[in-house]
Amino acid sequence: MNFLSTIVTFENLHEVRRLCHWGPIIALSVIAICSTMAIIDSIIWYWPLDTTGGSINFIMLINWTVLILYNYFNAMFVGPGYIPLGWKPENQQEAQYLQYCRVCQGHKAPRSHHCRKCNRCVMKMDHHCPWINNCCGHLNHAYFTSFLLLAPLGCSHAAIIFIMTMYTQLYERISFGWSTVKIDMSAVRQFQPLMPFSVPAFAATLFALGLALGTTIAVGMLFFIQMKVVLRNKTSIESWIEEKAKDRIQHYQTEEEFIFPYDLSSRWQNFKQVFTWSGTPIGDGIVWPVHPKCHQHTLTIEQLKQKADKRVRSVQYQVVEDYNGACCPVNKGIQTFFRTPCTEEPRIPLSKGDVILATRGTKWWMYGDKVLHDDKLRAGERIRGWFPRRCVEKCHYDTASSDSTSDKKDFV
Ligand SMILES: [Zn+2]
Ligand SMILES: [Zn+2]
């Protein structure tokens, strides 16, 4: 354990439970299968260790595996960094510019968001990643992005080994007849492999090739997305906030100008905020360097404005039909079944008589907050999610909505 903890910085040992989830189990299995198969294929069939090239190839494969696991485990166990429970700004006055998190019983520092999966307010939250079963945020952003770069590189190397192994072993030894498929395993190439390339070995290599190519494409795409986040110093959540800011300003025709405060206007500067030689990003996750025209609370004030705006633009609905919370309910119509929103966001069960404040929706589904009784509200409970549109009817005594044009904007 001592050895492990020098490589991987465990914030808390109980964090090891993060491994018990389908994401890390699948991710680690793919890493294990691809690296083991690449090493076995190289040594036995493609590039034996007694050649210089073979030794370099072997060392490189080991290197990829070590680097990938190092960044993967750090992304998982260092974690994004959480805002301390019950946190409030040093200067009490500043609390008015911040949102309050009822679950963490504290204010939300700039750039932090509450993650429902982690059940904490996360520093510079980007998203909750099921593959590391943790959030991607301030402290693990560099590890996470490095992993996204290294995994496709290592997988491409492995894929080349798999293709070359199958090619050299099967070339001219496979013939397809009308009645028989003949694979002759007796022939040898320039050097004698340690053992014949059997059908199970072929099947395992082909399977590993599929995994390696799939990982290269899927994770490679995620790397480009994440690199854009780093170079603009703007998380995916913040891109959404910026978009809503522009929409809000346009909707109310105010003369405000919204400048995103954390983009330091040079890609290199933004890059250096996240990637440092020590591995720890710059900053404490609470106070951030900002654009000269902005201040520490530019974004949080905008978020408060949007929140207030959302309240005005939300519409009150009454539940007229029970709904059990299924993703694809079978008794709510065929369109509701097939047009279920493609998101991990929860569905909320409804019972007749409930009242919902809806904030957005599609033609068949809506998203909103269940209006709760006072005792539940005080306990910090919040029931929010998707439900079929046909289960609700708009309230006539609509107090929540004062602007009918905005309803259309939200729901059409
Ligand atoms: Zn929170
Ligand atoms: Zn999370």
Image (tube, rainbow, N blue to C red):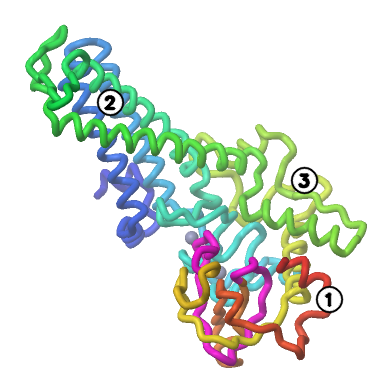
In the rendered image, which residue does mark 2 sit on? 162
Mark sitting earlier along the chain (2/3): 2
The label shown at residue 291 is 3
In the rendered image, which residue does mark 1 sit on? 403
Q: Residue at x 40, y 51 (%)?
A: 131
* Alpha carbon distance from label 2 to label 1: 62 Å
Nearest the eye: 37 or 278: 37
Nearest the eye: 377 or 407: 407
* Alpha carbon distance from label 3 to label 1: 35 Å
Q: Is mark 1 within 8 Å of ligand 1?
A: no
Q: Residues within 10 Å of mark 2 (few under 14, many from 20)?
A: many
Which x, y percent locates residue 254? 91, 61
Nearest the eye: 254 or 81: 254
Q: Residue at x 23, y 27 (%)?
A: 39
Mark sitting earlier along the chain (3/1): 3
Q: Quadrant of residue 249?
A: bottom right
Where 315 sits versus 297, above or below? below
Q: Residue at x 48, y 36 (%)?
A: 220
Which x, y percent locates residue 257? 86, 53
Q: Quadrant of residue 151?
A: top left
Q: Amino acid at mark 1?
A: Asp
Where 182 sits versus 338, above or below? above
State whether the magenta stretch is mostly helix, strand or loop.
loop
What secondary structure is found at the residue carrying circle 2?
helix
